[in-house]
Amino acid sequence: MAHFTKATGLQDWFNQRLATDIVSRVMATEYWIPKNINFLWAMGMVLVITFVFLLASGIILMMYYQPNVETAFDSVNYIIMKEVEFGWLWRHVHGVAASIVFLIMYIHMFTGIYYGSYKKGRELIWISGMLLFVAFSAEAFSGYMLPWGQMSYWAGMVITNIFSLGDLHLNGLVEWIRGDYVPAQAFLNRFYMLHVLLLPLVIIVLIALHFATLRIPHVNNQEGEELDFEEEAKKYKSGDKKGSKVMAFANDFLSKDMLVVSIFMILFFYLVFYNYDFAMDPVNFDPADGLKTPAHIYPEWYFLWSYEVLRPFSTNIGLIAFGFAQVIFVMLPFLDRSPNAIPAHKRGAFQIWFWVLLADMIVLTAMGKLPPEGIYSTIGLVSVLLFIALWIVLPFITKMEKKL
Amino acid sequence: MTKTNRRAFMGKAFSAVAGVGAIASLYAMKKSWDPLPSVKAAGFTTLDMSEYKGNELVTEKWRGKPVFILKYTPEMMASLNDDQKTRVIQIGSDYFMVTLGLCTHLGCIPGYNPDEKSFLCACHGGTFNVAGEVTKAPPPRDLDIPPFKINGTTLVLGEEGDEYKKLLEDGKTLRV
Amino acid sequence: MRELKILAVIVVFTLITYYLVEPFAHSQMHKHVEGEGFAYSDLPALTKTGDALKGKELVMGAAACTGCHAITKEGIVAGMDPAMAAQSYGVNPPDLSNAGVVYDAKFLAALIKNPAHALKVEHKFDAAKGKMHPMPQFYGAGGDIDQEIADIVAYLQSIAPKAEELTSEQAYKLACGGCHENRYAGWTQVGQTPKFKKKQDELKFNLAKADYQDALTKYMGKLPPDLSIYIRSRGEHYIKTFVEDPQAYLAGTAMPRVGVSTAGMEKVIEYLEDSGDAKRHERESIGPKVMLFTLVFALFAFLWKKELWSKLH
């Protein structure tokens, strides 16, 4: 049995029982971060803060939301928006955060791609991150169903129809997912469950995994320099803070994280109070009507690029392309054959690949929203083919890269 | 059998029993997601077919989905070719187009233009003619025909009558 | 410096994406109508100065307005309840007490002369095909018809409240409320939903509402939508320009041009904002405070970081 002594104070009392000193060293004060980084390294903390906003606002919304097809729309638009004190604030925070969290995730992802932070022992960081992206996508989609407006209903109809998988005609699967022939009570209830319980649980577990995958390989730095963390840590601890190439996560790096978070919050609250329509589509302020399709059905902006991958083809090929787009990012650590884990601007062809991919995804995003007619469907088709081609050539251009 | 082997075996056996339990619970959970009997039972709609007027599209509701009923005028019947006529449903001396009112592309509801006698889907621009056939992509196939049974002058949607089964066999529609 | 360069790259790509999926995509998907600020320039200008006293005689007498319209302000009540009126005319002929301020004068004159033309519903009511608008044309009472119409308009203006005294309820009820329910404001086509003391009263009220809506559906082709949160789903610009000329957006729509005056429209918008965006004043007053806080928060974050990092470099 462990030996306990009379505690010298509250900290010691907890330390004897929970080893809090070891935990705080491992997680914070002796968790070493390279000094040679920029503000892009703070996006993880920005995401954590945004997730906390989503969680806090979601808890309040959940106290008044009613997952019933008759009352859901009014519980959001009347009870929460008109009656609950600050209900409008929580809803706007929740809606804007749900949209902006994807912007930060995309910045976070492209930072990882640019600096090669998925290579040499960092593969699991990338893969767990992509799993988080998938979980957040499911969370966003299920949440979009809940106000039970026109866009909720028709996005629910169109997206669940994808599971009939074209010529496989799995209508039984679609009806199983919906619990009905069309989105109705069973559908709303189960997406509510997914949104407030199952998916948040999955997300929290994945966030823990994502952090854990980071601890041993440490974060990358902006030159791709391989650091001897033990040697540098020794310098830091011996008092040579200026000479060491590393710093402690807390409070050294944390203070920079919070500075970036604070600047992000200026943008975030500007959007919450003054420019929220982009995150709360006006069409969804019309109640769901299964007998009237809206003139334009489009997903939220962060799904547009993958939606556009689906559109220019016949159903079967479109689904194959869509499936390809969903899994291909996860494969990145294995498709990049280069021996170098360095920033893109030192990698020749890969640098071009990176900027073309980014531009192509922005074009796909724009085309995914525009009506697929005339020149827009042509641009869409070309961009999809380019997207697929980029991933096919990636192993070849990276294989040719010389070891630096 | 040595003691260690036996222990390893019992460990595996225990895992196997636990696995059976887990699979059985997953099966029960899958069944709990199935559409409820009341939802399935609400899946039949009976229509009195003597009430419709020629070239006037009426949208009925079946399983929460819109069903198009379009009674053909004699001129409209004359404009159909033999292949198109196989999709026509005859009740007494009247002829009808009966299809799901959902575009076969991604499930939007096409609108009917009685002057041009065609359907246009506003979502992605697909068009259909009065026989319910695709006349412009992206829809991959003609409008689906819901399962039906003819009962004198009424039509029961959701039951599979002989006429419907024949359409299904001939590949004129999918089972929806 | 490098960090500012990176920030610039991110800002540029984010703004391009935002521009493409929001302003640009919406400009491609939705018809944009500029509107003409309720000038109704297709209608003839008023040339005569009306006499309210003569107008009153016409309204009560020769023009026979009060045969169908109530003017509660002058003690003239409706001959029928709303549901019965809707069954006879399609909609309940509106109470004219506030018509002089809610409606544009030029529009009122044109309406009295030829309702289907002023309302822009001639595609629906074509006298040549025997389809008459339920409101009959005024053919004059024997004198100069333009003078008589000017008198009627002058009378309606004389009994109406002043523009600045008009309430948002008065404006909405007259301009929209005969056809459009507004559940979030408690308004139905048959009147404000009262507090019911007995179940029977509630059932009676709902029955009258259902009867009215049935008649209205028959008259309009479909039930006109509930406008509770149209201010969020359509926005102020769309509502104003749509009301000014529905045909400009939806050719062939059964919705008539309502002919509201600028003052009437302002009040209608206020009513829609109260029902659909009730907490806007709170949002507008808290916004600057929160923005100020985030700036202070950023300042302190900066100072803390500066202190810690001075030991690192």
Image (tube, grey):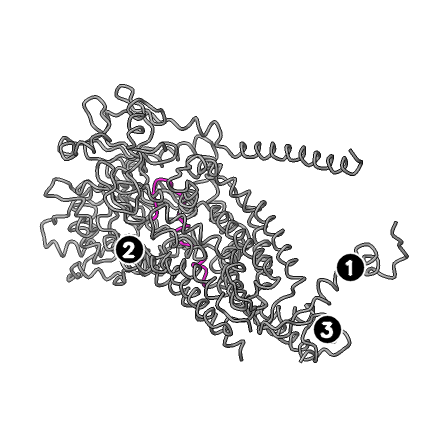
Callout in the foreground (2, 3): 3
Q: Which residues are magenta?
A: A275-294
- Label 3: how many Cα within 10 Å (few below 14, some 14–19, many 20+): few
Q: Earlier in the sequence, mark 1 or mark 3?
A: 1
Which SS does the magenta portion mostly show? Answer: loop
Q: Nearer the viewer, residue B146 or A87?
A: B146
C-alpha distance separating marks 1 and 2:
61 Å
Q: Tell me if residue A291 is in the magenta stretch.
A: yes
In three-dimensional space, the C-alpha distance between marks 1 and 3, rounded to whole angstroms, equals: 25 Å
Mark 2: few/some/many CA within 10 Å (<14, 14-19, 20+)? few
The amino acid type of the residue labelled 2 equals Glu
Which residue in the structure is indicated by mark 2?
Answer: A373
Instruction: Mark 1: give few (<14), some (14-19) or many (20+) Cα within 10 Å.
Output: some
Task: Please check whether the numbered discs 1 and 3 fall on a single chain.
Answer: yes
| Circles 2 and 3 in contact, beta carbons < 8 Å | no
Mark number displayed over residue A231: 3
Quadrant of image for the C terminus of chain A: bottom right
Q: Which residue is mark 1?
A: A20
Residue A66 spot, x, y in % from top left: 52, 42
Helix, strand or loop for disc 1: helix
* Residue at mark 2: chain: A
Q: Residue C85 location, x and y as percent?
A: 27, 37
Residue A83 image offset from top left, x and y in percent:
52, 49
In 3D space, how far apart are the residues under numbered discs 2 and 3 (Cα atoms)?
Answer: 61 Å
Q: Mark 1 belongs to which amino acid?
A: Thr
Task: Classify residue B114 by image quadrant.
Answer: top left
- Residue B20 visible (yes or no): yes
Dot 1 or dot 2: first in sequence order is 1
Q: Secondary structure at mark 2?
A: loop
**Residue furthest top in the image:** B152
